[in-house]
Amino acid sequence: MKFGLFQSVQLPEPGAQAKYYREALDQVLRAEQLGFNSVWVTEHHFSRHGIVSATMSFLAYLAGVTSTIRLGTAVAVLPFHNPIQLAEEAATVDLLSNGRLDFGVGRGYQWSEFHKLNVPMDEASRRFEEAMDVITKAWTSPEPFDHRGEFWSFNDMTVHPKPVQQPHPPVWVAASSPASMERVVRNNWNLLIGQGETLTHVAEQAEKFRALLGEAGFSYSSDRVVAARAMYTAPSREQARRDTEAPFMWFKQTGQEVAAPPDHRVELLPEDYKEYRRRFAGGAGASYDAMLDSVTLFGTPEVVSERIAGLREAGVENLIFFVNFGGIENQKVMDSLELFAAEVMPQFKE
């Protein structure tokens, strides 16, 4: 199995943004030393829920201070970006890292981001598909190309630099709805499963992806699925709960605040987003205990190992761990990573 980090720099203490960025960097560097395979950075805007708004800038910096760990976006929200500019920035990260970029993309789900950027949510899927078409052409077209789309138009386009990985960095797509899953399979992309999905749904998504790929005539392997999980390994269950409950619930609450519109404006959501809200495990009614039972990997090395073994049996062999939620103390995060590397990771070597 492969293990990585899923970094979302939150800001529970206003004014402490430099502190939380330094801690995230420390965690990445230590994870590389401990043998973690990857770090994935998530994009958020306008909220203390996540303050990595310039993902490619962060990854370009990481490319210069790391040497082996792969660098991923989880995800770049395509409806918010000029696709040519994003193609250039991503190719630059791939170049600076000598081919270590994993290009994770999604259509976005946070209502407040769409609202503040004045991007209609019912355009998200169409904007996503057009952006991926442009980005793929920008990376692979041997000749200058024109593009005339619903949202973007480009003339005689040639993009430099090109990615180091050929034909382009691996593409990973966040998919939850049936339509999103079908889009991933149709394009033979790789699958990202979010940290808010229940463990049961993770297994169902992995199996559905395997089956649909086969029906489409594409090959499946377990390294084509990445699942994100909140993870904290501690010497005792009591310590795991004591260290994580308040920070994780702060993270959950702030996520709800930016993900959903005010109650009187829920009708503004497209129907597929409403369905996602109904299913999403991080919904308004989910308690810490409910999340502990069905979503997170919090506990002793034995408990965490048992949960991971279940995911492996379901065909998920590439996990990325959300470890710095809600301003949990940096030393505690480091201790968790050390304990995981010492007592859990060896059980799942290839």
Image: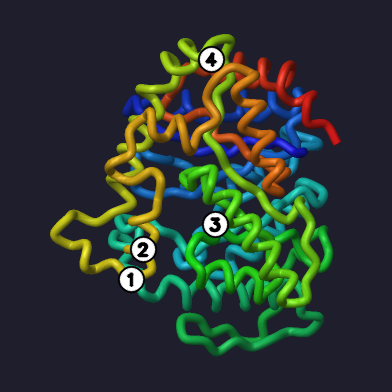
For label 4, the crowd category at 10 Å Cα-Cα, with few meaning under 14, some 14 to 19 and many 20 or more, is: some
* Residue 290 quadrant: top left
In the image, taking residue 178 as reference, residue 113 lies left or right, namely left
Up the image or down, 142 lies above or below 10; here it is below
* Residue 244 quadrant: top left
Identified by mark 3, the residue type is Ala
Mark 4 or 2, which is nearer the eye?
2
Q: Nearer the viewer, residue 114 or 244?
A: 244
Q: Earlier in the sequence, mark 4 or mark 3?
A: 3
Q: Name the residue rendered at 49%, 16% in the picture.
A: 240
Question: Is the residue under label 1 in contact with that under label 2 (CB below 8 Å)?
Answer: yes
Mark 4 or 1, which is nearer the eye?
1
Where is residue 138 shown, x and y percent of the image?
Answer: 69, 74
Mark 1 or 3, which is nearer the eye?
1
Question: Is the residue under label 1 in contact with that under label 4 (CB below 8 Å)?
Answer: no
Q: Which numbered dot is residue 76? A: 3
Q: CA distance from mark 4 to mark 3?
A: 29 Å
* Element under disc 1: helix
Disc 1 marks which residue? 271
Up the image or down, 205 lies above or below 20; here it is below
Q: CA distance from mark 4 to mark 2?
A: 36 Å
Q: CA distance from mark 3 to mark 2?
A: 22 Å
Identified by mark 2, the residue type is Glu
Q: CA distance from mark 2 to mark 1?
A: 6 Å
For label 2, the crowd category at 10 Å Cα-Cα, with few meaning under 14, some 14 to 19 and many 20 or more, is: few
Q: Earlier in the sequence, mark 4 or mark 2?
A: 2
Up the image or down, 87 lies above or below 193; here it is below
Task: Let me know if residue 337 appears in the view.
Answer: yes
Where is residue 270 shown, x and y percent of the image?
Answer: 32, 71
Identified by mark 1, the residue type is Glu
Task: Let me know if residue 56 appears in the view.
Answer: no
Q: Which numbered dot is residue 275? A: 2
